[in-house]
């Protein structure tokens, strides 16, 4: 076993995994898995820069993670940064801050690398299961971008496109700092049009409709699963490898888009940092299922973070 640490810093959240990995058996044993909503991508789509307060929230989380990594005695650490820090003009400030706190530089990876990590993390446990047909389509709906990966045991094709729950919310549902509550039909249609254009782009590279099993990753998808199961609190064990039928995803998405902030916040399994962006995230998932004719989505709690950990091991 090798004790490794992986950090995934996205547009909306930053996450840590400390685990014991055994490459010989394919076993990854969690020691510490946590997530903090930092909204690093706050305003990036509009300004092109990382906001000072967003950087400070992220650095505060990094200090907490540094303490946890030291406590567990991880031998190796890899820090991967995704969409928001890829786009920002002042990303050097972000790199310097992370290096000072954690002693490693964040790797601002490409969308294709992001997709590779996501696929490995999501499917390592699924290969060999008789009830899930290959090829898999792994969909990682993030804050700023969504990754699409088709593969069997290995990646066949991958593409990252700029649709995510934060980006769609800020682009279409925000006016003068206030988020539409609830969105209008025209605003929802504008999001749908953006998603459709992005799916057209993804299909230029990735044969989305050839997939036999849709695997959904990240907070928008796991939250939809939690709502579908009427969980009284967020329960990763109940969510991991749950299967949510298309009709349920459609009903939940329509309900979220018709709800006010207060109504969404009252959902027991809802993370406070997702209240404003969950409607757009659920709509991305629904649109993907409509495009490929998926009857269900298999939900995975294991994703890019696990793929990063395997790359370290």
Image (cartoon, rainbow, N blue to C red):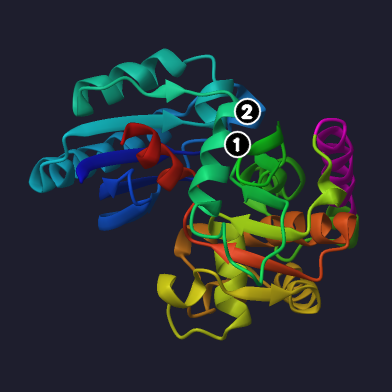
Q: Which residues are magenta?
A: 189-205
Q: Nearer the viewer, residue 16 or 84?
A: 16
Residue 214 colored in magenta in the image: no
Using residue 232 as the reference point, say whether residue 4 is left or right of it.
left
State the residue at coordinates (70%, 71%).
Answer: 256
Binning the other alpha carbons within 10 Å of mark 2 as few (below 14), some (14 to 19) or many (20 upward) gives some
Q: Indicate yes or no whether the magenta region holds residue 190.
A: yes
Horizontal and vertical percent position of residue 157: 73, 34
- Quarter of the image with the C terminus is top left
- Please tell me the numbered disc located at residue 112: 2
| Disc ID at residue 138 | none
The answer to whether residue 33 is left or right of residue 119 is: left
Residue 255 rendering spot, x and y as whole percentages: 74, 76
Q: Compared to 202, does 283 lie above or below?
A: below
Residues at discs 2 and 1 in contact (Cβ within 8 Å): yes
Q: Is residue 181 left or right of 304 when viewed as pictured?
A: right
What secondary structure do most residues of the magenta stretch adopt? Answer: helix
For the residue pair 74 and 179, the one nearer the viewer reads as 74
SS at mark 1? helix
Q: Which mark is residue 115?
A: 1
Indicate the secondary structure of the residue bearing disc 2. Answer: helix
In which quarter of the view is residue 126 placed?
Answer: bottom right
Instruction: Give whichever of 163, 158 is nearer the camera.
Output: 158
Residue 70, percent across and down? 11, 40
Looking at the picture, does residue 148 appear above or below residue 228?
A: above
Mark 1, Cα crowd under 10 Å, few <14 / some 14-19 / many 20+, is many
For the image, the number of numbered tags is 2
* Residue 147 in which image quadrant: top right
Q: Is residue 94 visible?
A: yes
* CA separation in Å, label 2 and label 1: 5 Å
């Amino acid at each position: 076993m090798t004790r490794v640490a992986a950090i995934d810093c996205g547009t909306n959240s930053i996450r840590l995994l400390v685990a014991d990995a055994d490459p010989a058996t394919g076993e990854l044993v969690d020691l510490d898995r946590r997530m903090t909503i930092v909204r690093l991508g706050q305003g990036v789509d509009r300004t092109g820069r990382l906001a000072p307060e967003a950087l400070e929230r992220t650095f505060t989380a990094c200090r907490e993670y540094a303490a946890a990594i030291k406590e567990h005695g991880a031998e190796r650490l890899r820090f991967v940064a995704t969409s928001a820090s890829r786009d920002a003009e002042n990303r050097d400030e972000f790199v310097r801050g992370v290096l000072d706190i954690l002693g490693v530089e964040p790797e601002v990876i490409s969308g294709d690398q992001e997709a590779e990590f996501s696929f490995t993390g999501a499917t390592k446990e699924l290969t060999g299961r008789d009830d899930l047909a290959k090829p898999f389509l792994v969909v990682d709906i993030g804050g700023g971008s969504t990754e699409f990966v088709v593969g069997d045991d290995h990646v066949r094709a991958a593409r990252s496109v700029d649709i995510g729950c934060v980006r769609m919310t800020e682009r279409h549902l925000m006016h003068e700092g206030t988020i539409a509550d609830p969105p209008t039909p025209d605003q929802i249609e504008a999001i749908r049009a953006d998603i459709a254009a992005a799916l057209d782009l993804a299909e230029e590279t990735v044969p989305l409709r050839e997939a036999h099993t849709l695997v959904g990753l990240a907070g928008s998808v796991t939250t939809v699963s939690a709502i579908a199961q009427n969980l009284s609190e967020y329960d990763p064990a109940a969510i991991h490898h749950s299967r949510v039928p298309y009709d349920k995803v459609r009903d939940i998405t329509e309900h979220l888009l018709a709800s006010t902030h207060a109504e969404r916040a009252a959902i027991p399994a809802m993370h406070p940092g997702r209240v404003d962006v969950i409607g757009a995230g659920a709509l991305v998932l629904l649109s993907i299922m409509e495009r490929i004719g998926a009857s269900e989505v298999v939900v995975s709690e294991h994703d890019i973070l696990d793929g990063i950990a395997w790359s370290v091991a």
